[in-house]
Structures are given as C-alpha cells and as structure tokens.
Amino acid sequence: MTFRRQVVAAAVLAVASITLANAQAPLTEKNVSMKMAQAIIDGTIEQCTKDGYKVSVVVVDYAGLVHASLRGDGTNPHTMEFARKKAYTARTRGQTSLEFMKLTDNPASAYLRQIPDTVAVGGGVPIKIGNVTIGAVGVSGAPGGEKDEVCANAGIARVADQLK
C-alpha cells in the first residue's frame, strides 16, 4: 500500500470513529423544571382568579407527560383531565390548542383530531425556547377556551426570562 493510500485509509477511519462516537453520545434536551412548572401554575391561577374563573392547570414536560398539576378550588371534576389533554395537544402539535382547533376546522386536516388525547378547544399553550417546544400548559374551567388561554399565557409570562 502506498503512503497516499495509507493516509486516505487513516482519514476514513478517523472520520468513521468520530461519527460512531457522536452517535453514542447521550442526548441533551431542554425540559420544564419543577420550579418552572410551579411558577407557571401560580401565574395561571392568579390570572384566572383575578378574572373570576375557577380553573385547573396541568403542565406537561418535553415528553408530553404530566409534570405538575393543580385542581383549583371549586372546579368541576372533568377539568383536570381536560387541562391535561389541552396541554398534551399543545405539546404534541407545538401550537396552541386553539390554533389546532382552527386548523382542524378545515376538512382537509380534520383527520388530525383522531390523534389520541388531543382536543380541539382553546386553553393549551406550548412552552418554547425559541422554536423548540419543551412542554406545555393546559387550563380548564373558564367559560371558554379563549379565556383559559389568556390565563395559560399569563403563567408562561412568569418564566419568560428563563425561556431565552
């Protein structure tokens, strides 16, 4: 083997070993922390209480799993599960559940409503760092999804400085 072929072979092996090493490295993902979830819940409840609504709030993490939740005083039993589904929808879609509702009003995309645990009603808002969705908050109990969404946005505003 000529010297040139030896150099090329060594370079190929070096590149291959780097690629394999990178493929085996653990993933680093941003996620919602417990303190962040608590602050979002506090801000959400505070806004809804100020607006006169009794709500339940669920925060899901990067994987769409419940990270924290609070059933508000005087709320109906269904509000916890509905808030979870709103949050899951926002996390899964990377858009508010109200945007999902508007999107799926179009018959061409209505099939998306068949995704398990998604709901087409306002009150779910993704938690994002830039364009990356790291979780979501869902709110249920106000008279209308638009009002739930206002409260969810107030909760996320509490941690906006941490989402940069």
Image (tube, rainbow, N blue to C red):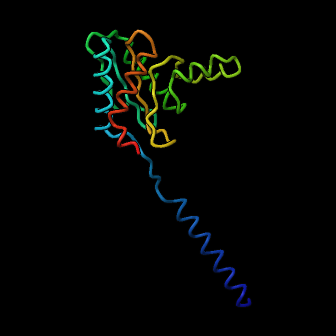
Count the marks.
Answer: 0
- Give how far across and how far down residue 42 sits, in percent: 28, 27
Q: Residue at x 59, y 19 (%)?
A: 102
- The residue positioned 34% from the left and 9% from the top of the image is 76
Q: Where is residue 54 in the image (x, y as percent from the top left)?
A: 31, 13
Residue drawn at point x = 39 percent, y = 42 percent: 163
- Residue 105 % position (x, y): 63, 16
Q: Is residue 88 left or right of residue 154?
A: right
| Relative horizontal placement of residue 9, taking residue 30 as reference (left or right) | right
Q: Quadrant of residue 68?
A: top left
Side (left or right) of 9 relative to 54: right
Between 83 and 11, the one lying in front of the other is: 83
Q: Which residue is drawn at 44% across and 52% down?
A: 28
Q: Which one is nearer the viewer's eye here, 123 or 61?
A: 123
Asked if 16 appears above or below 87 in the picture, the reply is: below
Looking at the figure, which quarter contains the N terminus?
bottom right
Quarter location, residue 16: bottom right
The C terminus lies in quadrant? top left
Query: Where is 18 relative to 163, above or below?
Result: below
Residue 75: x percent and y percent? 31, 11
Q: In which quarter of the image is residue 46?
A: top left
